[in-house]
Image (cartoon, rainbow, N blue to C red):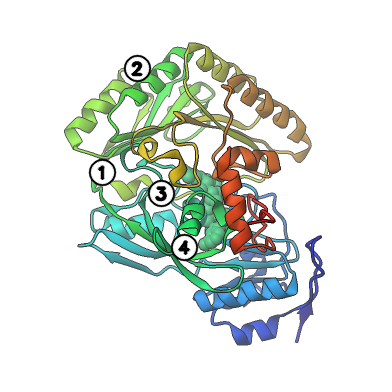
Amino acid sequence: MTEHTHSSSPQTSPTAVSVPQLRATLKGQVIAPQDAGYDEARTVFYGGFDRHPAAIVRVANPTDVSHVVALARESGLELAVRSGGHSLAGHGVSDGGIVLDLSDMKNLQIDVEGRTAWAETGLTAGEYTAATGAHGLTTGFGDTGSVGIGGLTLGGGVGYLVRKHGLTIDDLISAEVVTADGRLLSVDAESHPDLFWAIRGGGGNFGVATRFRFRLHEVDTIVGGMLVLPATPGVIASFVAEAEAAPEELSAIANIMVAPPMPFLPAEHHGQLVIMAMMVYAGEVEAGERTIAQFRALATPLVDTVVPKPYPEMYEPMGRGPDEEVARSMFIDSVDDRAAETIVEHLRASSAQMAVAQLRILGGAMARVPVEATAFAHRKRRIMVALGAVYEHREEAAVHEDWVSGFAAALCQGDGGVYVNFVGEEGEARVREAYPGSTWDRLAAIKGRYDPTNLFRLNQNVPPATDG
Ligand SMILES: Cc1cc2nc3c(=O)[nH]c(=O)nc-3n(C[C@H](O)[C@H](O)[C@H](O)COP(=O)(O)OP(=O)(O)OC[C@H]3O[C@@H](n4cnc5c(N)ncnc54)[C@H](O)[C@@H]3O)c2cc1C
């Protein structure tokens, strides 16, 4: 019998976790430090988070979730809640605490006639999309198949269908959530409407979501793929203008970067500045081809894989994230020639292995939902920007931090604001930027009602309002 005592939270005095007792209580798998699979189980998408939890619990059902939540509450141990493990801040793993890992909970019930699906939160975006895609149906998630639907949905969800069908939360009909007191709540517009509002953008602050009920859309053959164009300031500004003017069926993600030596890119273009754009036209194929032709006309494409294909094929396999990276995200409202020049200058100036400015052109269905309707308050913003640099040696961190801060400051257009799922370990001021104005106060009040002791704090944290 092995017992581990760890001290991780400044707010509490943790007591021991008895692994044998946990194993006896739970249906799911408990992985402890001495177990063979421990190192793999504590690994999250991004390197650089070398944390050693006291136990990792791969929960099997909501009852297990309640038990683990109770254990965290009673022991005072820090609780990390993980779905797909892609948190930019490494929130999916705790040092010394308990990891509640939902990745074994992958049940999916598709109601083809009713156009809805109940999905357990251990599913990844790719798994869900492949299964619903077999029926020509989908719900919009992000741009990467391995991201968990848990974290992505709770933060909002911005992806390939954002202009056509809105954010992921715009298709969330209801959810089941285990709150800090261990109860399993059914949450929708009628039942716990305050919580339903908060979990649509407020992240993991309010409880453990065990499953979601989503609306499904008919999205079968799309016109989609990758279009690589040379990135001059003129082409960048025109690309953004075209993407804004395009029908809502089109959602585009433009990654502007120095072309890496990737096999699909002709060698003579390696090292040149390119727009590596991911495009999805979710509508009639001929209209899609006409829309994509506008982009092909901006410059001679260097690579063009945009073809009619089943939507799930947009999710290609991807490896683990880098160990060393700086990133900064924000919303802006336009990319004119000046902004495009700023982008080119900063990317050229980076000494990183890989530096990228990602632009996501928003609007459409996402912007038609009222700002106050959910805890995602950036509905009216036109473009989401993510700047990043991947580098080799930790000692270089300061150089790249300066670069990303300077780049962000140069692009900033007044209002600030950031999407919570694109925030790393950046401090409380940035979390407040994710929840501007009354959104923060409303979230803090609801947090006060459902999690007054801030049990769910290893996240982009909104502390409970004391009078909540
Ligand atoms: C390569 C990559 C591509 C991305 N692309 C997109 C994109 O296109 N669009 C987009 O919107 N976002 C995107 N993201 C951001 C992504 O949405 C967030 O990182 C998200 O938090 C990941 O969810 P996860 O479940 O995989 O991560 P996890 O690390 O498992 O979870 C992140 C946090 O969410 C909370 N959480 C997760 N599951 C639950 C649950 N079931 N109940 C309660 N709380 C939970 C916890 O607080 C947890 O710390 C991307 C991230 C990466 C790394």
Q: Is residue 272 above or below residue 356?
A: above
The amino acid beneath tag 3 is: Thr
Residue position for label 1: 309
| Residue marked by disc 3 | 168
Q: Are marks 2 and 4 in contact (CB under 8 Å)?
A: no
Where, quadrant-wise, is the C terminus in this rendering? bottom right
Q: CA distance from mark 2 to mark 4?
A: 50 Å
- The amino acid marked with disc number 2 is Leu
Q: Is residue 416 left or right of residue 134?
A: right
Q: Which mark is residue 192?
A: 4
Q: Residue at x 62, y 49 (%)?
A: 46
- Asked if residue 46 lies left or right of residue 145, the reply is right
- Amino acid of disc 1: Lys
Residues marked 4 and 3 touching at CB (< 8 Å): no
Q: Is residue 168 visible?
A: yes
Nearer the observer, 197 or 328: 197
Distance from disc 1 to disc 2, alpha carbons, whole Å, reads 23 Å
Residue 76 is marked as none
Disc 2 designates what residue? 298
- Label 3 near ligand 1 (CB < 8 Å): yes
Q: Quadrant of residue 433?
A: top right
Query: Spatial distance from mark 2 to mark 3, Cα to Cα?
Result: 31 Å
Quadrant where the image shows the N terminus: bottom right
CA gap between label 4 and label 3 equals: 20 Å
Of badges 3 and 1, nearer the viewer stands 3
- Mark 2 residue's CB less than 8 Å from ligand 1: no
Amino acid type assigned to the residue bearing label 4 in the image: His
**Residue 39 located left or right of residue 106:** right
Q: Position of residue 376 (x, y in %)?
A: 49, 43
Q: SS of the residue at dot 1?
A: strand
Q: Is residue 44 visible in this depiction of the protein?
A: no
